[in-house]
Image (cartoon, rainbow, N blue to C red):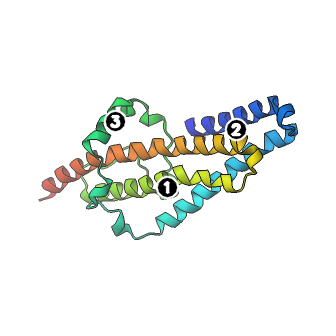
Amino acid sequence: MFYLTVIFTGILLIASINAHYSYISELSLLYCILTPIILTVSVILLDGLQAWIIRRLPSKWFDDTKTCFDASKKERKFFEKIGIKFWKDYVMELGGFTDFHKDKVANPNDPLYLKRFILECNYGYVIHIITAFSGFLIIFITPLKIFYMFALPVALVNMVLNLLPAFILRYNVPRLKSLLKLASRKKK
């Protein structure tokens, strides 16, 4: 719900501010309302397409043995500093698209489940990092005259909404790997 609120609030703010100043830019009220909606839908579709493509990449590139997905000590300190454990539960989790929910660890004693959880986190991390920055591609479909008024704000909202889950996924992987080690020892 948080995400939808941010998206709709962002569209409303962008449209309202630009509608208020439309006399300066000589844009119609309808244009000021429809443009952020069209750009937002475009970015969401682009994000979805990229997620679909990334999910088709080999799972061995994202499995629990890949250390490139582990957060460094500096990153973990940064996550603690921004209070990630206090706000992470408010960020929407879209595991339903892959039929694997990552909002809580349902089976902490099952190594296969934990490996899948880590795999899904790693896929999600790559998807969110790529889509956070690829949202800026809308500048190429937006006339320069309205770039700062519409495209840049939409791209910035998209970036923030993708970086938050990327941070959460990166924050969770070391904890999941610790659980995996414990679960693997118990199975022996």
Crowd tier of the residue under label 3, counting other residues whose Cα lies within 10 Å: few below 14, some 14–19, many 20 or above: some
Q: Quadrant of residue 1?
A: top right
Sequence order check, earlier mark of 2 and 3: 2
Q: Secondary structure at mark 1?
A: helix
**Which numbered tag is attached to residue 57?**
none
**Which numbered tag is attached to residue 78?**
3
Is 3 located above or below residue 119 in the figure?
A: above
Q: Secondary structure at mark 3?
A: helix
Sequence order check, earlier mark of 3 and 1: 3
Report the residue at 27% width, 47% height from top: 174
Q: Is residue 59 left or right of residue 4?
A: left
Q: Is residue 118 visible?
A: yes
Residue type, numbered disc 3: Phe
Residue type, numbered disc 2: Ile
Q: Is residue 138 left or right of residue 179?
A: right
Report the residue at 70% width, 49% height from top: 39
Expressed as whole percent of the image width and height from the top left, the position of residue 14 reads 71, 35
Sequence order check, earlier mark of 2 and 1: 2
The label nearer to you, 2 versus 3, is: 3
The label nearer to you, 2 versus 1, is: 1
Crowd tier of the residue under label 2, counting other residues whose Cα lies within 10 Å: few below 14, some 14–19, many 20 or above: many
Q: Which residue is mark 2?
A: 11
Expressed as whole percent of the image width and height from the top left, the position of residue 53 reads 52, 66
Q: Is residue 34 left or right of residue 185?
A: right
Q: Which residue is mark 1?
A: 130
Mark 3 to mark 1 CA distance (whole Å): 20 Å
Residue type, numbered disc 1: Ile
Residues under numbered marks 2 and 1 in contact, where contact means CB atoms less than 8 Å apart: no
